[in-house]
Image (cartoon, grey):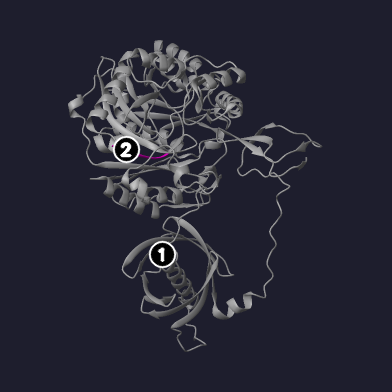
Amino acid sequence: QTFEKLLIANRGEIACRVIKTCKKMGIKTVAIHSDVDANAVHVKMADEAVCVGPAPTSKSYLNMDAIMEVIRKTRAQAVSLNVSICCSFLSSLSLQASEGVTFIGPDTHAIQAMGDKIESKLLAKNAKVNTIPGFDGVVKDADEAVRIAREIGYPVMIKASAGGGGKGMRIAWDDEETREGFRFSSQEAASSFGDDRLLIEKFIDNPRHIEIQVLADKHGNALWLNERECSIQRRNQKVVEEAPSTFLDPETRRAMGEQAVALAKAVKYSSAGTVEFLVDSSKNFYFLEMNTRLQVEHPVTECITGLDLVQEMIRVAKGYPLRHRQADIPINGWAVECRVYAEDPYKSFGLPSIGKLSQYQEPLHVPSVRVDSGIQQGSDISIYYDPMISKLITYGSNRAEALKRMEEALDNYVIRGVAHNISLLREVIIHPRFVQGDISTKFLPEVYPDGFKGHKLTDLERRQLLATAASLYVAEQLRSQRFLGTPRIPIAKSKRSSWELSVHLGDGIYPVAVSKHGSSFSVEVDGMKLNVTSEWNLASPLLSVTIDGTQRTIQRISRNASGETSIQFLGTVYKLQILTKVAAELSKYMPEKAAEDTSSILRSPMPGTVVAVSVKPGDMVSEGQEICVIEAMKMQNSMIAAKTGKV
């Protein structure tokens, strides 16, 4: 016996995740939503749904008064929160507790203590947990920030006291970057958490980010549920996570687990929570922060332990003791999670993209795949919320098996209408350094120092792509000649069986000869023959193609009448132009459209809100000078002048 009705004060995939467990436990659910989320998946899944305000989170999902009114109106017995919780809300919850409403999560004291990075660091020190050297107080202004940074020694990390999710965090390597970091971090912190207090600590260069999942009840019992490796990050946000970590030995794992449990007990923690550590190359580990909520990456822990963490949180909130002992917690197999974002990975490893999902198909037909998402075909990805599309999780008896399934799942994931980061995710999981477990939080900038450019084709892969594209072109030509259901007399009796084509890919133009044999094509590229077979179902977004015995899953993203086509091959989308030999010879007479000169224009690389303009008409600006600040999906981005000139 737990609760009859539970209100979920959240949105997206995590709200859907809570609803799934509630259904399993026979608990009715109430969803809240902003006006733009009226048709969201979590709203449709819940038993009841109430609008709490307009799109901005501060006016809807963080609108405390409106949420409290919904709790009273729907008579929810419990409330599940997974958002940046303000202290005002916590006091409201304390009020609600007297009315018999239970909060699914730790008590207000633990949230306040751990939600404040300054207080949590002092508590961790007292609980004998290893901590990073730094300044434990609140930084008053930019001048004080510079003074403290010089005392600690560069590089330093400036971060929001109430922060999380990479918001309000900046690394500074000198005085100028400290001043700029202080300004942006305090602005981001104020807009994301309603609290602009900052702290400064030593930045540990090239560490791993490894966290311990803890679970505690109201009876003084606490467990650590092994670790999660979260080192693959961009802009301090995790991209790929796995459990267990390739790096930890049993002794280090136990030491980290025992310190995490000691901290949980020190703050009388009761629920699921995560203690995050930075681990250096010598396996020294330092407390980073404690997240008093269910983390985005919790599914990998569920996969290797067999526990439903949401169910455990609900049981603990009702007052039941934990059902397991530390010795019962296994590491069964290996799990990997990729965060699929609506982002363009070719710009700073991921600038947000908005739009409507015109086509969406999750790879659930691949074995041992789990997808936690809060969207569906037709959903809008807007500027107001996090650009996450889903969490893609694969499981295997060992790491190699889990990674192989992830590769297959990414190839079989159909997302159209917005830019997405599948090409980056696929490249990360097949990279030799990642496969060997040689990773750190610097992995992306080290592996791609000039930015991510997509998959680099080997000669064999290039031939496979050219042969597949040419076969696809011919299959389409043959389909367009067929008239189904009409007894038309064909004008041309002769059946064509060979084609001479010219395929433009990247900087090269390749002559390709195609001949048809039944349902397969023999394709000659670079003087080498390849055999390409498929069912050639051109209406399907996914095409399984076999090239000389090698199976590949490809997606044709687009095509037009001038022979231009985009094909997703090995995760990356390649643009090709396929023409007949005659058309290719004539194409050199076609005029080329001149590229627009944009050097004297400042164009935002993403949609967002202009929060500050640093210049006015008539000002002289130099190259690299800040012109304005754009806030998109809770992150602030400085827009700079590309050249010296007058505004």
Q: Name the residue located 25 percent from the left edge and 19 percent from the top edge.
A: 320
At label 1, the amino acid type is Glu
**Circles 2 and 1: CB distance less than 8 Å?**
no
Magenta stretch: includes residue 316: no
- The percent coordinates of residue 202 (x first, y second) are 46, 24
Label 1 belongs to which residue? 461
At label 2, the amino acid type is Val
512 horizontally vs 609: left or right:
left
Which comes before the other along the chain, label 2 or label 1? Answer: 2
Place residue 44 in its image quadrant.
top left
Q: Name the residue located 52 percent from the left edge and 87 percent from the top edge.
A: 491
- The percent coordinates of residue 329 (x first, y second) are 21, 30
Label 2 belongs to which residue? 300
Q: Is residue 410 visible?
A: yes
Can you tell which mark lies on residue 506? none
Q: Of helix, strand and loop, which one carries label 2? A: helix
Q: Nearer the viewer, residue 119 or 274?
A: 119
Figure disc tally: 2
The relative height of residue 354 versus residue 197 in the rendered view (above or below) is below
Bin the neighbour count of mark 1 within 10 Å (Cα to Cα): few under 14, some 14-19, many 20 and up. few
Quadrant (top left/top right/bottom left/bottom right) for the C terminus: top right
Q: Is residue 116 visible?
A: no
Bin the neighbour count of mark 2 within 10 Å (Cα to Cα): few under 14, some 14-19, many 20 and up. many
Q: Which segment is the magenta one?
A: 239-245
The relative height of residue 92 versus residue 182 in the rendered view (above or below) is above
The relative height of residue 630 versus residue 474 in the rendered view (above or below) is above
